[in-house]
Image (cartoon, rainbow, N blue to C red):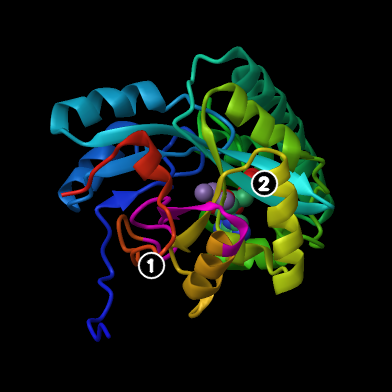
Amino acid sequence: MNFMQAKMFSPIDLHMHSLASDGTMTPHDLVQRVHDSGVQVMALTDHDNTAGLAEAGEKAAELGVQLIPGVEVSSEWETQGIHIVGLFVDPENAVLQEGLAKIMAFRDWRATEISRLLEVAGVSGAEAGARAMAGSRMVGRSHFGRWLVRAGHCADASEAFGKYLGRGCPAYVPSDWIPMTEAVHWINSAGGSAILAHPGRYKLSASRLRTLLTSFREAGGVGLEVCSGSQAAGDREHLGRLARELGLLGSVGSDFHGPDIGHAAIGQLLPLPDGVEPVWARAGIQLH
Ligand code: AMP
Ligand code: MN
Ligand code: MN
Ligand code: MN
């Protein structure tokens, strides 16, 4: 029996965000930070766009970090918002880019709608504020959250989501994201591997999660994040069992958004449980 404590550091981290979506670091600075933290293999997985990949690729080549091109697609399954991480995607692929453009257009429309609802709730100027925080890039609820804090309406992002932006709150826009199967199709069209992101975050019962994963696999999904940043105790073992039983691959990803955002840190991840085949093994990636 092995009594050694599993180490809370992984040389591979396949889920993180840059300024191209709702991260707070440029792709350049993010890759530098990845390198400095000792991670050898990273995936940049911005929400619904791949605009940060070129800059990240240049810096990764300079530093000797292996960059896997990725994206995190916002989708839904039976009214539940579901995030699908695509790894090893070809960012030039037309099916993927046309699909992502639809989501980006929806996000743009939704930003105006969130702002209108905030105005009704007594908060003015949110659209300009959130768009200024996002620059010309993807605008999401995180940007509204950060603006609400900066403008003094909320103490922190968690309050902003709890009071205004979260599901059921006054500025929540019921989002009609694309079906989960469509996200998988785009990723597969781009030669990628579709991974169910942070399965613990959907608050599904064990049997619902199994049903979701079964549909996901039928649609062409190949794996799930067995180890993610700030997951509940026991999730890793439960998700590892599901991966083995359903013949799905395992991925690991912190979901890092920035040093000042949340608790996730680059590479602060437990290893995959025994018997779970890593998604990166298929790509011939060896870790030293
Ligand atoms: P969106 O995709 O624009 O609907 O925004 C979802 C993003 O908001 C997630 O990817 C997180 O980065 C962030 N987020 C979601 N819930 C919270 C929360 N309770 N507190 C802070 N950030 C959150
Ligand atoms: Mn995010
Ligand atoms: Mn996500
Ligand atoms: Mn993410």
At horizontal 43% and vertical 50% (from top left) the residue drawn is 257
Quadrant holding the N terminus: bottom left
At horizontal 47% and vertical 32% (from top left) the residue drawn is 20
Q: Is residue 141 visible?
A: no
Q: Is residue 98 visible?
A: yes
Residue 66: % across, % down:
25, 35
Indicate the amino acid at tag 2: Arg
Residue 65: % across, % down:
21, 36
Residue 264: % across, % down:
39, 62
Q: How many discs appear?
A: 2
Indicate the amino acid at tag 1: Asp
Which is more toward the observer, 241 or 74?
241
Residues in magenta, as a range: 245-264
Disc 2 element:
helix
- Structural crowding at the residue carrying mark 2, measured as other residues with C-alpha within 10 Å and reported as few (<14), some (14–19) or many (≥20): many
Whether residue 159 is in magenta: the answer is no
How far apart in space, not on screen, are marks 1 and 2 (Cα)? Answer: 21 Å
Q: Is residue 147 above or below residue 194?
A: below
Which is more toward the observer, 46 or 159?
46
The residue to which callout 1 is attached is 274
Q: Is residue 111 left or right of residue 282?
A: right
